Amino acid sequence: MNDITTTSPDAAPAPAEKPAAYRVLARKYRPKDFSDLMVGQEPMVRTLTNAFETGRIAQAYMLTGVRGVGKTTTARILARALNYKTDDIDKPTIDLRTPGEHCQAIMEGRHVDVIEMDAASHTGIDDIREIIEQVRYRPVSARYKVYIIDEVHMLSTQAFNGLLKTLEEPPEHVKFIFATTEIRKVPITVLSRCQRFDLRRIAATDLVGLFSTILGKEGITAEAEALAMIARAAEGSARDGLSLLDQAIAHGGGAVAADAVRSMLGLADRARIVDLFGYVVRGDVKAALEEFSWQYEAGASPAVVLTDLADFTHLVTKLKFSAEAANDQSLSEVERVRGAEFSTAVAVSTLSRIWQMLLKGIPETENAARPAGAAEMVLIRLTHAAHLPSPEEAARRLLEMSGGDAARSAPRGAGSGNGGAGSSNGASASAVSAQANASSQGGIQARAGEPVMPSRMTANGAAMLRAVPEAELPAAQARGQVDLKPEAAPAEPVVPLRSVADIVDLCQKNRDILLKTLVRNFVRLVRIEPGRLEMNVPDDAPKTLVTDLQRRLEEWTGIRWMVTVSREPGQPTMVETEAAAKEQRFNDARQDPDVAAILARFPGAKMVDVRIKVTDVEPDETPEIAAVAESEEGDILPGDDIEH
């Protein structure tokens, strides 16, 4: 007899198993021990390893670095190492290959003795006061009570001050671990009580290796070029890179392809960027604009195109001096091969010029109302500049051209009367020193061991240069082709600028009263050397002061100047210095017995001026000081000139 099993129609069906919740790659593959942290953070791991082995465990640690390099993860691993306990090991250790009693709870952020606090939402002294009250109690189950405070720079000044004493002398069962992205905002009094570890940006090569390992575990195929693009976009952040990798997997339907990543990120094709660089250095404006239009229509952002062009310019410059730069795994084969070719064909001066123009053009494009048009104007400037010679090439061409013109304009003869007159006129036109003539031609100066450049005047009055070897100088001087006599009037040399007073004098000399006033009132000198000026300016200074000063200095001195604003306080301005000196003179005068007697004799009188009376004094004597006082009615008081 067969058994028949019947099912009631009212019986509920067996519940289906819920699929496991998806965990993003950044959380799923978060490092769990120090061996995983070795990716890009070897110095910190080595230091902690030695400290744990020797028992030199600090009471507080400060972890700093950019977002996504593993500060919070490192803090949890460190808390796990401090409280590590198994059946065989019961001491702090960095060997965490075998999970301990507290490891799982600590890594998941739910252990009762490992307290994590976000300083961005707990900024006040009350939150710190709560921590101070709790540190007195021993941990419940772990070896140490560990406080992990993330984004610690967000704490208020009162909170930092309240934490100082506990941080310096905490109970032996308490450890502090801080993490921050803004280390400069943390008071030095807090930093001095912590062991500081700077977590470095993870290299693109290490990120590519990390992505490849994770995709291998996930069983997902990926193109090497796609991983390189994601690694570059991550900018040294493992978390950002894994988030982009997650997005690329979803965008590509389970695979990571270069075209899909390029479309997802709005990037330009690296091979097309190399082509665009070739058009720029060749000076082909039409081809460069057509290439940019193709990339723009393909979805690339104009600012991204220029940024990638700047990156390739930087790569070519590096390859020019270091061939090992081609070993970077984040580079494509096209970048390696053609970058090496460009590094041998393009001059450093050209690369530097392209780099500087791109640095200025990228923010212009980002802030422009029409980014595509702004980017095209930048490319037009770049291609136009490709036809311009370098300063060295311009000087060489000038010398070549001047040699032929000077030969054609030389005097025909010195014997006849007419010829003598012509020779006399030519000699007077060339009667300048080699240095002065070189200065008039844009700063080309004669140096020892090099040909001297005498001057000739062409028909249109332009001064031309002709190279004369030193061996031929006596004969050339006898023929009147060059005159190096001391009575020749050289160009007036520019006095070196060593202080703000020198700059003010230069403004006065060139009758720029407005710039002179601005320099006196707002320039706080930090550092000055030939061609470079660093200064600090107050917030109320005119916005155009830096550019106006740089332009005027270049115009007046004839050399290129770099004027920058520094964060250092710098020296007081000339107005502040003069005000301080005047106040000091007033204070000195008030200490004088005669002045004090006059002011006491005439109530309501006040000093309006103190003048230094310069007389012929001996080296060990003091110049006489004259104080001028007036009454409340404005009358000059008797005995107003008090000398001593």
Image: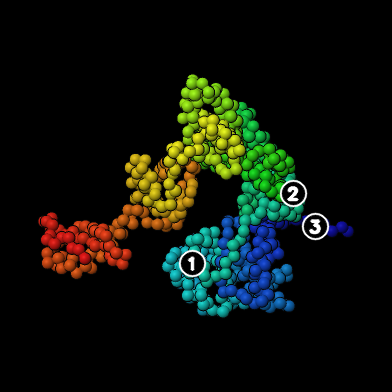
Give the spatial CA distance, label 3 vs label 2.
Answer: 46 Å
Point out which mark residue 188 bears. 1
Q: Where is 455 relative to 173, above or below?
A: above
Q: Name the image quarter holding the C terminus.
A: bottom left
x and y percent of residue 580 in the render?
31, 59
Residue 222 makes an appearance in the image: yes
When the figure is inspected, residue 86 is found, relative to residue 153, above or below; the finding is below
Callout 3 crowding tier (Cα within 10 Å): few <14, some 14–19, many ≥20: few
Q: CA distance from mark 1 to mark 3?
A: 79 Å
Could you tell whether 494 is left or right of 148 in the image? left
Residue at the (68%, 56%) spot, across then down: 20
Tell me, yes or no, if residue 122 can be seen here. no
Residue type, label 2:
Ile
Q: What type is the residue that disc 1 sits on?
A: Ile
Q: Which mark is residue 51?
A: none
Q: State the mark number for residue 220.
A: 2
**Which label's residue is closer to the chain start, 1 or 3?**
3
Q: Disc 3 marks which residue?
A: 5
The answer to whether the residue labelled 1 contacts the one labelled 3, judged by CB atoms less than 8 Å apart, is no
Frontmost of labels 2 and 1 is 1
Residue at screen point 57% across, 62% down = 64
SS label for mark 3? loop
Task: Pick whichever, 136 or 492, lies toward us.
Answer: 492
- Disc 2 secondary structure class: loop
- In the image, is 612 to the left or to the right of 393? left
Q: Position of residue 428 (x, y in %)?
A: 46, 30
- What's the distance in space between the residues labelled 2 and 1, CA to CA? 47 Å
Nearest to the eye among marks 3 and 2: give it.
2
